[in-house]
C-alpha cells in the first residue's frame, strides 16, 4: 500500500489473526466465536488461543455482564469566586431537564445521563455523562459539551469559558475518575474452570494462579504506585482488538485500568476480569474502512439492533479476548521458565 | 491484503500520513524532518502539522534532551520470612558485579544498570534495570531476568520462585514507579515561541496557554485522580508514531504519563513536554516489516551509529511529534468553539 | 496528669496556643476570630499568625464557601456472580426511599443522601452517603450501614455478608474517591492580597508565590506520585486544630488531600485553598472533655443553630487556619534561607 | 492545665492508656512490652489489647524486621534549559563525596546516603536522602538541604534557587515516592497465629481473614483510587503512638500508606504488616516534655545505644501496635455486627 505520489506507504499494515473460538455467555445465550487481533506482537495470538481453548472446555465459557455504558466530557469554566461557582452548580443540578434538551438538539443519538462537578477556588469542572448509542462518542460528546457550554454561558451570568475539556473527563490519561464515575462500557467477565482443565490445558493449579494474582496483580501493582489497576497485560489484548475493529486505540490507556480476580474454589478456579472503561463503538471514525466493516460484520456487531446494543456486544467480545489472554499469561508465569520458553519456541518457528 | 485461505483480512491497514517538517535541535545540531503518523483519527494530522509549522518559525525549533535510557523487569520471589528476604537483598546489593556477569551472558546487548527492590512481608520484588541497545528490550529483559532468577535461586538458599514478572516493572500499566525509577527513554522537549508566532499561527497568547495548562493539565488531571500525568493528549501522538514505526504500542499506557509545562515569558511562550517513559526501539519485534523498515530509514533511525543511538533518535522524533500535537490542541482549546469547528470542517472535507 | 494507680501519665498533654485573629467572611458576615492549635511543632504558631495578620490587612479576609457536607461508609457484599450483583444494584437504586427509611430508624440525625457502587466480579461495594448533623459521623454511619446491610441481606436473596467496611468509604487512607464523590465537609477558601501587603508582610511578590505554587505544589507533588494533593503542609494545621477541638485526628490523612491555587492578578495575589475532605464534628467522641468544650464554645461552635451548622462553622474555621499556614510557608520558601533562619531563631528563643 | 493569663487551656490533654503486653521478636531477642496510646477514640484501646493478647499466645509473637532507615528533603532549582539541568545532575552524581562533606558540616548526626532527581523542562528536583541518627530528622534535613543548595548554587553556574522544598520529599502528603525510594523507617512485622488461637481469641478463621484482606484492603482500596495503601486503619494506631511519644503526628499521612497481608496456611494465619514510612525519633522537637520522656524511657527507647538504634526500636514498637490493632479490626469485620456491638458495649460502659 504505497502512495504513488510520494512513494511512501499510505498505511501501517498491522498483522491480524483471528483467534478462538471463545465460548461466551450473555443474557442472550451462549455462543462460540472468534475475535480478530491486530498486533506486531505475534506471541499474543497463541497466548489468547490457549485461554480460548479453556473456555470451550467449560459449559458456559466466559459469562459477561455489562454493568454500565456512558461517555463523558468535562468542561472548564471560571467565575469571580467560589460562591458564584457553587450557586451555579446548585442551579444547574435543578435544571437538568433543560440541559437534557440542549443535548438532544446536538445529536439524534446523544442523551444526557448525569452531571458531576468539582470546584477548586473559582474554577468549575463540569463532567457531563452521555449515552451515545453505537458510537464510542468522542466527537458526539464534544459537540454536546460545546452546546452545553454555550447554553450555560448564555443563561448563567458570572461565568467565563476556560476550556471545552478540563481533563476531568478523562480521555486517554491514567486517572481514577473513570472507574469511579464511569466512562465507556463497564464489563465484568467470569469464568469457572474445573481443576482438570487447569491441569491439562494450563499445567498449573487454581491455588497457584490465585496466589500469583494476589501477589503480582494486586500487591505488585500497588507497590508500583498503580492507580485502579490490577492485571497482567490487559493493554495488549485491548490494543489488538481496538486496531482490528477501527477503534481509537489510544483509549487503551484507561482501558488498561481493570481488575483481575482469581480464587481457588476447592481446586476449581474462579477467574474474573472487570474492565470498567471499555471505549468502543461500531459506527463513527475508523469504521468506514472496508476491512473494519468486514471484521465488525463477522463479529455480528453491525446487526440490526437497538441503539447501543452492537457497541455493547463488541465490548463483551473485547472483554472476552482480554480474559483469555490474561488467564494464559498468569498461568504461564506460575511455571518457572515457561514464558521465555514459549517466546523462544515461537521465534524459532519464524513466528 | 486478504488471507487467500480464509477470505479474511490478514492485516489492519491503519491510514498513515507524514507530517512536518518539524524543526528539532539536539546536541548534534538542528534539522527539519517529517514524521509518520498512523491513526484512524485523521484530525490528528492537521493538528500536529499546525504545531510543526510553529517550530519552523523559530530558530532552533524543539530542543530535545535525552535524560535517561533503561528498560526494566521485576521478578517476584518468596522466602520463609522478611528477615531472610532482607538478608538476601543486602547480599545481592554487594554482589552486583556477579549479577552483571549473568546478564552479559544472556545477550550481547543487555547490560545491568541498577537494581531496586520492595519487601512486603516474606515477598521480594526485585526490579532490574538494563541497557538494551537499540531494542525496546521487552524480550531481552525477560531473558536476562530469567537467568538472574535462576542464578539467585541457585546461589541464595531460602528463596522460591513466584513469578518472572511481579508487576513492579511496570509494563503497560498506569503506575508511578516508571517515572520515579526510570523505564524507557526519558526525553524533555523545549520550545520558545515568540509572541508574534503565537498570535499568527495559533490565534492565542502565551498567557492564555499557560493559564489553561495549569488549570486543565495540572489541576484538572489532579482532580481526576491522575497519577504522574499532566497533559492533554500525548497518547494520541504516541500511538500514531508507535504504529508507524513498528513499536509495541500498548506501551502508550505509561508513555501517556508525561508533563506539559507552559510559561508566559513577557509574551513569549516557554513550552515544554517531559516524557519520562518512551519505550521505542529500532530493532526487534515489528521492525521486520518492510514499511516499518522504510519508515525507520526515512527517519534516519537505521543509520550506522553507536548502540542505542538510533533508538534514542527515534525517541526524540517521537517526543517532537508529541510536542507539536500538544501545543496545537492546547492553543485550540483556549478559543471557544475552535475544536468543534475544526472537526466539523475536516469531516465536511471528507477527511 | 498522672494515673495514681500506675504512676504513669494518663494523658498526652499537647501544647496549645490560640492564634489570630483571622479575618473570615462567610454568607453570614465578616468576623475576626482566633483559633486554637495543639501541636508539638511550636514553629507552627508564628507561621499561622503571620498568615492571619495578612487576612486582617484585607477588607474581607478569607472568604469561605461550604460546597458539600456528607459522611460515608461502604459495605462489602458477595453474590454467586456479577449478574446477581448487577440486578441487586439496579433494584436498590429504585428502592432508595426504602433505604432512607432504614437509615432514619438507625438514628435521629442520620439521613441517607446518596449511594454509589462498584462491582468487581461477584463482589459488591456499596458506598452510602449520609448527612450526620453536627457529628463527624463515624459511628452514626457505621450503625446506619449495619442496619442497611441487615435490611439488604433480608430482602435481597443471593447476597452474603463480607464486611461492614469495604475500604471504598474511604476512612483515613490516601485515595481519590473522597474528593470525587465527597466525604466530610468540602470547603473552599479564597483570599485576595494587595501587592503592598504581600511585600510588607510576606517580603515577596504575587508572581513568585504563584510560580512556586505551580512548580512545588502542583508539579512537585505530581512527580512524587501524589493523589489528588497539591499543597505544602495542610496536614500540620489540620492536626493542630483537630487535636484542640476533640476530633478524630487520623482523618488528616484524607484531609491533607487538598489543592492550593495562587494566581498573580496584576501584582495582587489570588490565594485559594480547597479542602474537600474536612471531617469534623462538634458533638460525639472527644467532645466531652472540658477543655474541648471550652475551645468549641470559644469558637462559637456550640451555639444553638440548625443541625450541622456548628460543625460546618468549625470546618470553615479549620480551613481558614489551614489557609493562613499555607500562605505563610509558601511565602517563606520563595526566599532563600528564610525557612531555616526562622526555625533557628525560634529555637534560640527557647521556643 | 490552664494558662493563668488568658484563662484558656494551654494544652490539649489527650487520654492515654498503655496497652499490652505485646510479644515482639527482633534480632536482639523476644520481649513482652506495653505501648502507650493517646487518643480520643477510646475503643482503640480494647481493640489493640485484643490483638496483643493474640501475640502472647504464640511463641515469638510479632517478628519485626527493619528494612531501611532514611529521611529526605527535595530542593527545587531552575536553569535556563533542560540541557543545563541534565549536565548538572550528571556532574553532581560524580561529586557525591563533595556533597557528603557539605552535609557533615551541617550537623554531627546527618549523613548523606543517596540522591535522586527529577527533571521537568528546565526544573530540577533534587531529593537528598540522609541518615539522621535518633532524630526523626525534619529540621536536620532542612538545614542540610539548605547548605547543599548554597553549595550547589555557588559551585554550579546556571542554576537558580526556587524552593528549599519541591514536594518531591514528600512530607505529609499522600504520594508514591516515599514507599519507592524510602523515607522514614521501613518496618515489616510478621505473625503466625495457630488455628486454635484464631478461633478462641478472634472468633473467626484464617481463611476468612485472608479473604477479607484481599477483598477489602487490596481490592477495596484499589477501587477507591488508593495509592500504595492496603490496610484497614493503620492511621489510628500511628496517631495514638505518635502523640504518646512526642512525634510529629502529621506524618501519619504517609505512615498510613502500608500493606497488610494475610494468608491461610493450613488453618493457621500468616499475618504481616509492612510499614515503609514510619517517621519517628527519640530526640528533637516534642521529646522535651516530661511525660514524653517518661514514656520513651518506659519503652526502653532512651537507652545508651548506637545512634539510630533507639529510634529504630521505637519504630518497631509502633509497628507492633499497628499490627495488633489491624488484626483485631479485620477479625471483627469478618463477623456480621461484631464491630457495632463492640462500640455499643464500650459506650454503655461509659467508655
Image: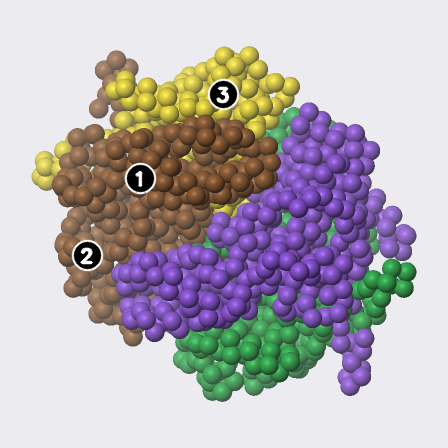
Chain colours: A green, B purple, C yellow, D brown
Q: Are marks 3 and 1 on the same chain?
A: no
Task: Residue at 58%, 66% (x, y): give it.
Answer: A234
Read off the chain for label 3. Answer: C
Rendering quarter of residue B7: bottom right
Q: Is residue B320 left or right of residue C327?
A: right
- Mark 3 and mark 1: span between their CA atoms? 45 Å
Q: Which is nearer the eye, A323 or A179? A: A323
Count of number-bearing discs: 3
- Mark 1 and mark 2: span between their CA atoms? 25 Å
Rendering quarter of residue C88: bottom right
Read off the chain for label 1. Answer: D
Q: Residues within 10 Å of mark 3 (few under 14, many from 20)?
A: many
Query: Quick check: B261 above or below C171?
Result: above
Task: Residue at 52%, 85% (x, y): give it.
Answer: A201
- Horizontal and vertical percent position of residue D91: 47, 40
Q: Is residue C198 left or right of residue C281?
A: right
- Horizontal and vertical percent position of residue D93: 44, 43
Read off the chain for label 2. Answer: D
Q: Which mark is residue B231?
A: none
Q: Nearer the viewer, mark 2 or mark 3?
A: 2
Q: Which mark is residue D111?
A: 1
Residue that carries the numbered disc 3 in the rendered image: C24
User: Of label 1 and label 2, which has the lower sequence position?
Assistant: 2
Residue that carries the numbered disc 2 in the rendered image: D27
Query: Quick check: B37 above or below D250?
Result: below
Amino acid at each position: 500500500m504505497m502512495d504513488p505520489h510520494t512513494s511512501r506507504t499510505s498505511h501501517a499494515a498491522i498483522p491480524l489473526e483471528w483467534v478462538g473460538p471463545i465460548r461466551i455467555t450473555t443474557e442472550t445465550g451462549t455462543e462460540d466465536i472468534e475475535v480478530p487481533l491486530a498486533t506486531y506482537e505475534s506471541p499474543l495470538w497463541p497466548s489468547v488461543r490457549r485461554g480460548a481453548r479453556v473456555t470451550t472446555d467449560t459449559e458456559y465459557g466466559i459469562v459477561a455482564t455489562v454493568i454500565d455504558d456512558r461517555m463523558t466530557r468535562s468542561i472548564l469554566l471560571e467565575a469571580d469566586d467560589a460562591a458564584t461557582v457553587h450557586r451555579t452548580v446548585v442551579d444547574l443540578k435543578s435544571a437538568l431537564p433543560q440541559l437534557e434538551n440542549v443535548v438532544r438538539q446536538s445529536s439524534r443519538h446523544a442523551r444526557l445521563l448525569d452531571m458531576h462537578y468539582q470546584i477548586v477556588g473559582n474554577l468549575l469542572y463540569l463532567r457531563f455523562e452521555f449515552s451515545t448509542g453505537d458510537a464510542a462518542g468522542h466527537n458526539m460528546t464534544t459537540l454536546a459539551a460545546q452546546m452545553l457550554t454555550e447554553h450555560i454561558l448564555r443563561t448563567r451570568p458570572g461565568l467565563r469559558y476556560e476550556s471545552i475539556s478540563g481533563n476531568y473527563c478523562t480521555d486517554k490519561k491514567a486517572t481514577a475518575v473513570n472507574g469511579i464515575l464511569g466512562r465507556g462500557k463497564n464489563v465484568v467477565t467470569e469464568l469457572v474452570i474445573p481443576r482438570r482443565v487447569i491441569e491439562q490445558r494450563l499445567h498449573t493449579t487454581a491455588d497457584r494462579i490465585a496466589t500469583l494474582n494476589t501477589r503480582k496483580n494486586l500487591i505488585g501493582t500497588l507497590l508500583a504506585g498503580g492507580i485502579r489497576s490490577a492485571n497482567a497485560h490487559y493493554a495488549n489484548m485491548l490494543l489488538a482488538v481496538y486496531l482490528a475493529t477501527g477503534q481509537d486505540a489510544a483509549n487503551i490507556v484507561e482501558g488498561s485500568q481493570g481488575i483481575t480476580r482469581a480464587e481457588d474454589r476447592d481446586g476449581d478456579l474462579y477467574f474474573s476480569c472487570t474492565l470498567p472503561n471499555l471505549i468502543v463503538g461500531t459506527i463513527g471514525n475508523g469504521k468506514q474502512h472496508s476491512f473494519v466493516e468486514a471484521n465488525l460484520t463477522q463479529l455480528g456487531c453491525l446487526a440490526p439492533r437497538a441503539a447501543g446494543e452492537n457497541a455493547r456486544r463488541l465490548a463483551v467480545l473485547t472483554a472476552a479476548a482480554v480474559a483469555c489472554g490474561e488467564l494464559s499469561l498468569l498461568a504461564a508465569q506460575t511455571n518457572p521458565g515457561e514464558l521465555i520458553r514459549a517466546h523462544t519456541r515461537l521465534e524459532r518457528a519464524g513466528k
